[in-house]
Amino acid sequence: MAHYVKEKIPKATANGFVRYRTNWLIVYDNWPLPAVNYTRAASHLAPILMDLGAFTVFDAIFVHGDSQMCEFRGAPIIHALVKPGAAPHLPPAPSEGRPL
């Protein structure tokens, strides 16, 4: 994903590209990989994006997969994607009196 973000930086800073007060980038992750642990992947990608200077160009970067969307700006946030009408898959509530 860092490769694709890196490719977009010169395009977004090129002469003639219209910039707005807020500029977002969305990258579609359609690589045919086994199940991805999005939490680990996001924690690996976040510092790479910082090193690329991606946040000097984009205010937010979203990586969109089939079931998750990772939002990068500061600390990564992972959103579950749910089809309309489907109940979201939520983790079970912690037992009463148990720390999280």
Image: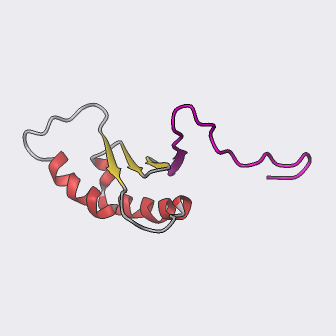
Q: Residue furthest bottom?
A: 34
Q: Is residue 54 magenta?
A: no
Residue 42 image point, x, y percent: 48, 59
Task: Name the outermost residue toward the right.
Answer: 97
**Which image quadrant: the N terminus?**
bottom left
Q: Is residue 2 left or right of residue 13?
A: right
**As drawn, 35 above or below 84:** below
Q: For the point 79% across and 45% down, which residue is it?
A: 93
* Farthest residue, direction front: 85
For the rendered model, the colour scheme is secondary structure
In the image, residue 22 lies at what x, y percent? 31, 34
The kind of secondary structure the magenta stretch mainly shows is loop
Magenta segment, which residues?
74-100
Nearer to us in this view, 89 or 43:
89
Residue found at the very far left of the displayed protein: 15
Q: Residue at x 25, y 59 (%)?
A: 6
Q: Residue at x 52, y 32 (%)?
A: 84
Residue 23, horizontal then vertical, whole percent: 29, 38
Please tell me whether residue 64 is drawn above or below residue 19 in the rendered image.
below
Image quadrant in which you'd find residue 52? bottom left
Q: Going 7% across and 39% down the picture, which residue do you hit? A: 16
* Residue 57 point in image, percent of width and height: 27, 47
Q: Is residue 77 left or right of residue 59?
A: right
> Which one is nearer the viewer's eye here, 73 or 3?
3
The count of marks equals 0
